[in-house]
Every structure is written in structure tokens, then in C-alpha cells.
Amino acid sequence: MKRNPATPWRIRLEASKHKENLFDNAVGSRAKGLDLDLRLREFEINQLTQRNNFFMIFQGVLIAGLVQSQGTAAPLITFSMSLLGVATSVLQIGMAGGAKYWQSRWEASTRSSEIAIVLELLRRDQPAVQTFTHDSTVLTKTEREQIKEWNSQHADPDDHIKDDTDFIKEVVRADIESGRKIGWRRHADWWVRYFAIMPKWSVSRIPIWVGAALLTFWVVIALNTVRLPGLNLERFAPSWFELTPLKPEAPEKISVEAIPPPPTH
């Protein structure tokens, strides 16, 4: 029996309920939606690492070839390598930026799914655990308003949705300072705690900055492989700045035969 295309979609939906469960998927289930968000978030993070490794290996090969030539390669080769390095750096920045966008997209989706599930569990008087949403400043304006409305309607603090911007920070601080109460190690690695860990560096932004640094490196190399009439790049360098070789050149030895004999009288 053929389906009548004129039949209203609601009637067709009711007739098909016995054939398929439309709620047993990421679209119809908040729990499965959160699981999908977590898997895609992890996928984007892993892809960011792998893609950046590819570019860094390629950049390393280019730089190694440039260093090995010690400036003796043909000018065309050096200039071409510089242009290739510039193009690779631009593409690396684009890749890292795109990866950061999609990682942020699924981070936001994970927080949105979690806060929706937390609200639903609290309405059912069920315990709810917040993982990504302790700090409401990372949520959207609508989600913050939902939290504020819920907390204002429930006087008991145990029923409140947590909104502590320093919660994760204090947990991390307590963890990195545990076991370092006394001794020289506590004082020796203070910079590790307060410079390397506590600032919460974005590991997904760092590849973008690395690409920008490599782009600057290749542009400088490229500019020093060409000579434009009437343009001397050296005059733009400040007088207090001078590059010196790591291995100073040995003084040129003067041959004894090259010394003229003293005049005779």
C-alpha cells in the first residue's frame, strides 16, 4: 500500500510510532545529545593536535634545510623556501583557527546540554552534577537567565544551581599545591604553579601563535633574500641592535710568503 503524500505529517508520524522510536537518538534524548557533544568535543581536540603536528613536522623540515645550507644555497632556492614557509605558516594559522572555532562550538554545545539536563533533573528532585557549568560566565545570556530564575525561585541553597567562578580555579590550586607544604621544591617550582599552570593557557590558541611566529620568521628570511633598488633594509635596524654569529669566524691567517721583505740599504 502506497503512502498518500497528501496525508498530514502528524497523522503519518502517529502511524509510524510503532515502527521506530524517534526519541532514542541524540535529537530526541538530552542524555544522548550530551554524549554526542562530548564525543565531538574530544574529536575536535584530537584533530587539532594531529593537524598541528603535520604542519610542525613540515615546518621543521624546511627550517632544518635552511640551517643546513648555512646561507650558501642558491638565492632562488632560499627565496622559494621562504615563500613556501610563509604559505605554510598562513595555512597553519588558518587550520589552528578553524580547529579552535569548532572546538569552541562543541564546548558551548556541551555546556548548553549539561545545563539543560541539570535543570530537568532538579525539577524532578534528582541529584545533578555540574562539570562544565560551574562558572556561568561561559554560558550564554539565556542560560544565565535560566539559572538566575531557578535560584530565585528556590530559597534552599542546596537546590541552587552552582555559580562559582572561582570553583575550578580553587580546585586546581589545591591540587597543584598538595604535597608541597615544606621543602625547597615548593619554593623552586613557584613559577610552575603561578606562571605555567594557574594562568590557564589555552592549548588550542597556542598553535595559532606558533603559526604567527613562524610566519614572521619566514617573512624576515624572505626580505633578506631580495635586494630592491634604492631600498636598504639594514638602515631600518636600530643602532643598538646587532646580530652576531654563534661561532665567530677565525681570523684570517697571513701567509709568510705574502709578507714583503724589508727594504735593503
Image (cartoon, rainbow, N blue to C red):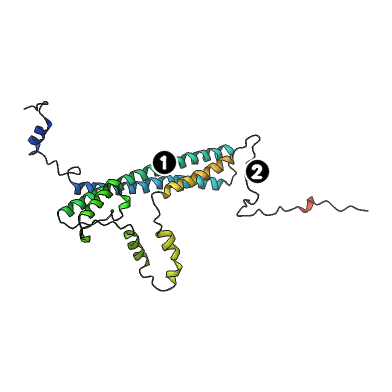
C-alpha gap between disc 1 and disc 2: 34 Å
Please report whichever mark, 1 or 2, sits nearer to the chain's N-terminal start: 1
Residue 114 in sight here: no
Q: Which residue is depicted at the point 33% across and 43% down?
A: 102
Q: Is residue 78 above or below residue 176?
A: above
Q: Amino acid at mark 1?
A: Gly
- Residue 242 or residue 165, whichever sits in front: 165
Dot 1 crowding, Cα within 10 Å, few <14, some 14–19, many 20+: some
Which residue is outermost to the right?
265
Q: Which residue is mark 2?
A: 235
Tell me the residue at 20%/60% (across/down). Answer: 156
Q: Position of residue 7 (x, y in %)?
A: 9, 28
Q: Residue at x 49, y 47 (%)?
A: 213
Q: Secondary structure at mark 1?
A: helix
Q: At numbered mark 2, what does the secondary structure look like: helix, strand or loop?
A: helix
Q: Is residue 167 above or below residue 217?
A: below
Q: Tell me if residue 150 can be seen.
A: yes
**Vertical comparison of 3 with 23: above or below:** above
**Residue at 53 percent of width and 37 percent of height:** 80
Which residue is denoted by mark 1 in the rendering?
94
Residue 126 lies, in percent from the top left, at 16, 56
Near mark 2 (Cα within 10 A), the count class, few <14, some 14-19 or many ≥20, is few
Image coordinates of residue 59 in percent, x first then y, are: 47, 45
Residue 87: give x, y in percent of width and height.
47, 39
Disc 1 + disc 2, Cβ < 8 Å: no
Return the residue found at the far left. Answer: 1
In the foreground, 64 or 51: 51
Q: Quadrant of residue 167?
A: bottom left
